[in-house]
Amino acid sequence: APRDVAFKVLEKPENFYYIATLFKENKVLQEHDQSKAYSWASRHKWFSFVGTNTISLYPPRRVDVSIVKSTIGAGEFKLLFYEESKTSTILVLSGLLDVKSSEWLIRYLVGVNPSMRLAMNVAIGIVVTKGVKAMAEQAAAGKPLAKHLTSGRRKGDLKPLSKGEIKK
């Protein structure tokens, strides 16, 4: 997709559900110029992921995302958009999620193992780049946004749960 189209998919945090189904609940908390603070959540029966992020847009080439506080840790990510041609863009993602600052379960499962910490960051990078690519291609083709799907075995959407259902 063209660089301007690819860049624009990150302008609305409310649409991040289309990047990854982890971002079930997206709410802009505050806006100032090209920066936004937003919260996100993905709630499940046995656990929930929640967080507050900021996103700063520097058109047409750079986006900075800060994970200020979240269940999975704090971190900084930078996305750079390079125009390869009029119809294609190279997306470069760099950053690090520090799972040592996460809640106890993630620290226990991932934080104690350097290989797992790196694997989690690689997985986040793959999901974000593939999700942005899918959204940009849909937007460039004039199609409505659709969820980015992985090749997992589970069929259908993850079901968000209310606080009452979580307590059951």
Image (tube, rainbow, N blue to C red):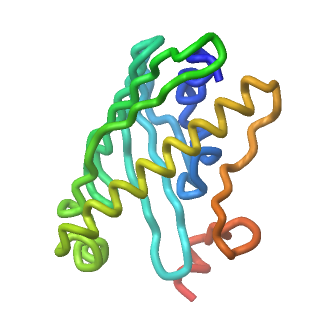
Residue 134, compared with residue 17, is above or below; it is above
Q: Can you tell which quarter of the image residue 66 is in?
A: top left
| Residue nearest the viewer, comparing 139 with 21 | 139
Where residue 91 appears, as percent x and y from the top left, is: 47, 30
Q: Can you tell which quarter of the image residue 62 is in?
A: top left
Quarter containing the N terminus = top right
Residue at the image point whose x is 50% and y is 35% from the top: 28
Residue 55, compared with residue 165, is above or below; it is above
Residue 152, compared with residue 7, is above or below; it is below
Quarter containing the C terminus = bottom right
| Residue nearest the viewer, comparing 138 with 9 | 138
Which residue is most to the right?
Answer: 143
In the rendered structure, the answer to whether residue 80 lies left or right of residue 97 reads right
Residue 87, compared with residue 13, is above or below; it is above
In the rendered structure, the answer to whether residue 81 lies left or right of residue 157 reads left
Q: Can you tell which quarter of the image residue 39 is in?
A: top left
Where residue 156 appears, as percent x and y from the top left, is: 76, 68
Number of residue marks:
0
Residue at the image point whose x is 29% and y is 50% from the top: 69
Residue at the image point whose x is 66% and y is 36% from the top: 135
In the rendered structure, the answer to whether residue 138 lies left or right of residue 131 reads right
Which residue is most to the front?
Answer: 85
Residue at the image point whose x is 29% and y is 78% from the top: 109
Where residue 58 appears, as percent x and y from the top left, is: 40, 15
In the rendered structure, the answer to whether residue 128 lies left or right of residue 21 reads left
Which residue is most to the bottom?
Answer: 168
Where residue 127 appears, as percent x and y from the top left, is: 51, 51
